[in-house]
Image (cartoon, rainbow, N blue to C red):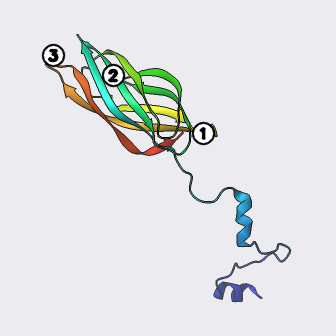
Amino acid sequence: MGFFSNLLQGKPAFENPEQPDRQDNDDAAAGPAGPKILPLVVITRVDCRLNGDRMDVYTKIANRSAGTIELDKVRIFGTTRELDNYLKPGEEKQYLLYSGQRPLDMNKDECEIDYKDASGDYFAAIHDIEFKRESDRTYSIRNLKIHLPIRDI
């Protein structure tokens, strides 16, 4: 067919007759079907222990995914702590996330947990920090709440 008749029919203006039409079942070669499933890791409990102007923040971290994950590190209040531990599906363990000075403001209001799945793909679970103001005008952590979606990093 000609150029104008193809346009009127909604077909490409020019066709390359040497290439066969692609069929729908060729998509299997492109990779696995469906959206990527991001494993979910969450902080389920916070225990903030105060000692003078310092605090220790213990948390329970749970693996809510179908596969084993490796906890890599946590970032909170400008510090990084290596966790280097595995969690099986449904498992939860206690970790010390922070030990140091209590913050004087609420500017650093996120906690990031980096982890990877069995394929070696890395993810980050961001948690929003809920602060409690102490009588000496410093802040402690009241709670850590997951901030979805999980980031694929």
Query: In the rendering, at what x and y percent does residue 59 appear?
Result: 36, 27
Q: Is residue 87 above or below residue 30?
A: above
Pair 2/1: label in front: 2
Query: In the rendering, at what x and y percent does residue 95 appear?
Result: 41, 24
In contact (CB < 8 Å): disc 2 and disc 1: no
Q: Secondary structure at mark 3?
A: loop
For the residues labelled 3 and 1, the Cα–Cα distance comes to 43 Å
Q: Is residue 104 left or right of residue 15?
A: left
* Residue 121: mark: 1
Q: Is residue 58 left or right of residue 115?
A: left
Q: Secondary structure at mark 1?
A: loop
Query: Can the viewer see residue 109?
Result: no
Q: Secondary structure at mark 2?
A: strand
Among numbered discs 2 and 1, the one appearing first in the sequence: 2
For the residues labelled 2 and 1, the Cα–Cα distance comes to 28 Å
Query: In the rendering, at what x and y percent does residue 98 appear?
Result: 37, 20
The three-letter amino acid code for the residue at tag 3 is Asp
Q: Residue at x 25, y 23 (%)?
A: 140
The three-letter amino acid code for the residue at tag 2 is Val
- Circle 1: is it few (<14), some (14-19), or many (20+) Cα within 10 Å? few
Nearer the observer, 14 or 136: 136
The three-letter amino acid code for the residue at tag 1 is Asp
Q: Is residue 55 above or below residue 120?
A: above
- Circle 3: is it few (<14), some (14-19), or many (20+) Cα within 10 Å? few
Q: Residue 56: which quarter of the image?
A: top left
Q: Is residue 102 above or below residue 120?
A: above
In contact (CB < 8 Å): disc 3 and disc 1: no
Q: Residue at x 51, y 40 (%)?
A: 89
Q: Residue furthest top?
A: 52
Q: Which residue is mark 3?
A: 136
For the residues labelled 3 and 2, the Cα–Cα distance comes to 18 Å
